[in-house]
């Protein structure tokens, strides 16, 4: 068990919090802690406290580059749709319903892909 430094005068960690994990989740956390050069308990504690205090994304897109790429693509699609909508409203040139359905189908497929990740 890790010891506090002799000069440490801060609050001692005396409260236990148990978390149930699958064996593969445990291996993933251990590998991430080793890669970060930290003990598992220290690594998990920092992840938990960072999420609650900073609002940074700890898991999800940071661990899954495919999800991050799809989110960026959906953001670009949303921006393009907003621009097209603004142009259609100001110019009065509305695209055909078939074109709108095609775009909507692509957006729905991308969302389904993100949910499956």
Image (cartoon, grey):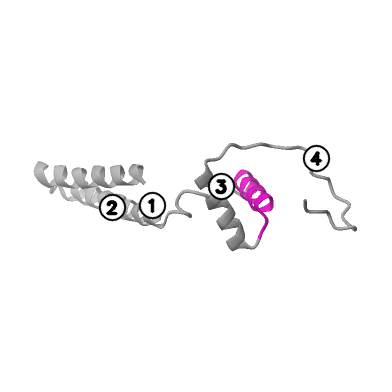
Query: Which numbered marker is on residue 26?
Result: 3
State the image coordinates of residue 77 (x, y, percent, origin top left).
28, 52
In the rendered view, tell whether residue 59 sits above or below residue 22.
below
Q: Which residue does the numbered mark 4 point to in the structure image?
A: 14
Determine the secondary structure under disc 3.
helix
Closest to the camera, between mark 2 and mark 4, is 4
Residue sitting nearer the eye, 111 or 12: 12
Task: Name which residue lies at 63% across and 49% down.
Answer: 44
Query: Which numbered marker is on residue 15?
Result: none
Q: Which residue does the numbered mark 1 point to in the structure image?
A: 67
Closest to the camera, between mark 3 and mark 4, is 3
Q: What stretch is highlighted in magenta?
A: 38-53
For marks 3 and 1, the one nearer the N-term is 3
Judge left or right: residue 41 versus residue 116.
Answer: right
Q: Which residue does the numbered mark 2 point to in the structure image?
A: 77
Determine the secondary structure under disc 4.
loop
Task: Name which residue lies at 34% across and 46% down.
Answer: 114
Judge left or right: residue 52 versus residue 83.
Answer: right
Q: Are marks 3 and 4 in contact (CB under 8 Å)?
A: no
Q: Main secondary structure of the magenta part?
A: helix
Closest to the camera, between mark 3 and mark 1, is 3
For marks 2 and 1, the one nearer the N-term is 1
Determine the secondary structure under disc 2.
helix
Closest to the camera, between mark 1 and mark 4, is 4
**Pointer 3: residues within 10 angstroms few (<14), some, or many (20+)?**
few
Task: Name which residue lies at 57% across and 47% down.
Answer: 55
């Amino acid at each position: 068990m890790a010891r506090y430094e002799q000069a440490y005068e801060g609050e001692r960690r005396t409260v236990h919090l148990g978390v149930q994990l699958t064996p593969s989740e445990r291996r993933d956390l251990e590998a991430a802690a080793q890669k970060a050069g930290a003990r598992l308990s220290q690594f998990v504690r920092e992840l938990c406290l960072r999420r609650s205090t900073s609002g940074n994304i700890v898991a999800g897109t940071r661990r899954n580059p495919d999800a991050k790429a799809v989110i960026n693509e959906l953001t670009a699609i949303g921006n393009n749709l907003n621009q097209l909508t603004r142009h259609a409203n100001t110019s009065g040139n509305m695209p055909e319903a078939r074109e709108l359905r095609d775009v909507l189908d692509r957006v729905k497929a991308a969302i389904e892909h993100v949910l499956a990740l």
